[in-house]
Structure formats: C-alpha cells, structure tokens
Image (tube, rainbow, N blue to C red):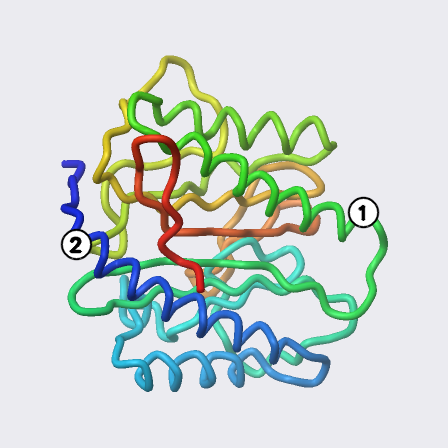
Amino acid sequence: MIRIYSKKEIEIMKKGGKILAKILKKVAQEVKVGNTTNYLNKIAEDLVFKYGAKPSFKGYMGFPKSLCVSINEQIVHGVPGNRIIKDKDIVGLDLGIRYKGYCTDMALTVIVGNPDKKVKKLVGITQEALEMSIEQLKQGNYLRDIGAVIQKHVEKNGFNVVRELVGHGVGKNVHEDPQVLNYAEGGKGIELKQGMVLAIEPMVVMGDWLVEKDKDGFCYKTRDNSLSAHFEHTIAVGKDGGIILTKN
C-alpha cells in the first residue's frame, strides 16, 4: 500500500528532516583521517537524542548501530566499528531518524583528502543524479521517470547504477511502498501523486553494478571491489516538482 500523507504530516517530516540534515552535516565534518567509524556513530546518535528524535535504523532488522558508514567498495549499510578512516577514502554516511512519529532518511558521501579526478567525478555525478531526479517528483509523472533520469546521467558519464538496491517510500515506517529503482524499467510504473513521500537514493559505482553482501550480514559492497558513492534525500511529491524534506 502506498501512503498519501497530509500537509500536516509532511510538515512534521519536514521538521524532522531539517534536524536530520543538521546532524548529518555535523557528522560529515568529523570524517577525518584517524577517526573511527564508531566515533562517527556516537556523534550521530548523541545528536539524534539531543534533538528529541530517535534513530530509526538501530534495531531495524537487527542492525546494531544508528549510523551506516560505508567506505570505498562498500555501497550501503556499513556497520560502524573500529575501522580507522584513511586519506583518500570515500565515506558514505546514511542516517534515518524518527521524529514525532515520522521517519526521514538521508545519505551523503564525503571524500577524504585529495583523491584523483575520477573519484571526484564519481561522487559529483552521483549527487547530480539525485538532484536531477528530484525535478521528476511532480504529480502526473511516473516512478519510471525517476530511474530513467538517474540512469541516463550516470551512464553517459561512464559509471554504472546499482540494480539490486533501491530507494523506497518513507514516513510512518522506515521502509514503505513503493520501491524506487535507480534505473529505467519497462513500462511507466506507478503514477506519482501529491502526498507521496519517497527516499530517492542513487548508488553509483565505477565498475560493474553487481553486488554482494558482506560476512556481517548487513553491508553490501561491489563484487569487483570498485569504488562507490551514495546520496539520498527524503522528498515529497509536489504539484510542480519534488519538495526536499531533508535539508537545513
């Protein structure tokens, strides 16, 4: 079932999303050489509670932490631990919170130090793909339009979109219908309507788009160990375009 949220509900999510964006910005500032991924998790979790929210990932399907930290070939759902951040790492941060009964979800990728131009391009193109897809979230468009824009932009720039991992609806629950593909599938799919709230999250890789799950049972990484990047916003479908809920 795809939920249609009221203006009042979306306004609550917007307040929660603003908090989430503030937190993730502060965590991103601590992505430095020598810091551990556990340290980043503690900062995120402390701030979530400070702002009167709750971490929505912790305990979800057994996930043990509040923040997902995915480095280099890790695409999503990296579990924080004792891993130390190194120069030229690409660090993906993914955080979800529950605020006044509603969930928002956001991710960004941080480059450590000064890596080569192709790495910068990978991260930049992934972010651009998300920004371009947001314009498609207007009433009367279709789910396929989102994935088509992402795929076209990514592939024309020489990268690949991950197929097995997708975006999703979000609101009352961490994950809701519909699934939001980052590539164009046959047929138009579901028509977008005002009040739908979607987490759009392009996951882009330098090499092949095939993935595998890590031994910990949570983290997904590229099968060929190529580098990856990930950006995400929670967005409400509007009359003329997407309304980003996860921004300062």
Q: Residue at x 46, y 62 (%)?
A: 94
x, y percent for residue 77: 46, 60
Q: Are marks 2 and 1 in contact (CB under 8 Å)?
A: no
| Residue 17 location, quadrant | bottom left
x, y percent for residue 246: 40, 58
Q: Which mark is residue 26?
A: none
Count the labels in the image.
Answer: 2
| Left-right relation of 212 to 175 | right
Which quarter of the rendered picture does the N terminus lie within? top left
- Residue identifier under label 2: 9
Q: Of all residues shown, which one is farthest toward the front?
A: 240
Mark with earlier residue (2, 1) = 2
x, y percent for residue 87: 78, 73
| Residue 187 location, quadrant | top left
> In the rendered image of this protein, does residue 186 appear above or below residue 48?
above
Q: Which one is closest to the eye, mark 2 or mark 1?
A: 2
For the residue carrying disc 1, how many other residues have a C-alpha within 10 Å: few (<14), some (14-19), or many (20+)?
Answer: few
> In the rendered image of this protein, does residue 180 appear above or below residue 228?
above
Q: Residue at x 47, y 79 (%)?
A: 41
| Left-right relation of 160 to 174 | right
Q: Residue at x 38, y 75 (%)?
A: 65
> Considering the numbered disc 2 on the image, is that residue within a helix, a strand or a loop?
helix
Q: Amino acid at mark 1?
A: Lys
| Left-right relation of 114 to 106 | right
- Residue identifier under label 1: 118
The one of 207 and 194 positioned closer to us in this rendering: 194
Q: Amino acid at mark 2?
A: Glu
> Considering the numbered disc 1 on the image, is that residue within a helix, a strand or a loop?
helix
